[in-house]
Image: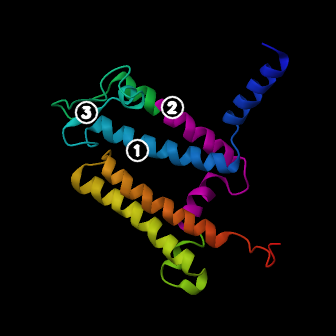
Amino acid sequence: MSTEESDTGKDFVSMLLNPSSTAANWYASIGIFGLFLGILNILGHIHPTYHVSWGGLLTFEAWNAAFEPKSEDGIQVVLSDAIFLGFCAVLTSLAFRTFGNQELGVGGWFKGLIINDTWPCLVDPDLGGWNKLFGAWSLLLGFVFYFYYGIVNTGWIDIGVYSISIALIAFGLGLLMAANAPEGDDNLD
């Protein structure tokens, strides 16, 4: 391996272990969501009849079956649960380390999820325009639908629920990004 390839590999690993602000937001979102699903899986509340094997699910059943029968006790821990929870905890801790090095810190990141310029647009289009109004509603409906269906039907890993939720959330994020985009030039020549 040449020195240039070695330096590229070190830069890539450094980038993964020291994420930017944007990457840290993704790390935190994926990590916290994974921890949530992992804990629900251990407690037996992720699916009405199955326990998820993360090793099987994430490798498309190359290592083992993705769904195993639920234990009678309700709490079931297997090696893939520990590995999955560990991976999600590492992602979350890398994100929180990045947030901790910033001015607002981890608490500021959590506060920014609730207190920002998106949610007031739910009731007043004059605050951000119609794109922000529909974007905020679409984002909220995507999250509410996912959590409602998960709580009522124990369907936290239902692919149909993911499809609807992701479509609503992605549409909402797209509209919000369009609303926050800077004005372009009047003359495109």
Circle 2 residues within 10 Å: few <14, some 14–19, many ≥20: some
Name the residue that disc number 3 marks: 75
Foreground pick, 85 / 132 = 132
Instruction: Say if mark 3 contacts mark 2, CB within 8 Å.
Output: no
Tag nearer the camera, 3 or 2: 2
Residue at 37% in and 63% down: 144
Name the residue that disc number 1 marks: 36
The answer to whether residue 149 is left or right of residue 105 is left
Residue 121: quadrant of the picture: bottom right
Residue at 70% in and 29% down: 13
Task: Assess whether residue 100 is covered by the magenta stretch.
Answer: yes
Foreground pick, 51 / 82 = 51
The answer to whether residue 3 is left or right of residue 108 is right
Q: Specify the segment rendered in magenta.
A: 86-114
Residue 51 percent across, percent down from the top left: 26, 33
The amino acid type of the residue labelled 3 equals: Ile
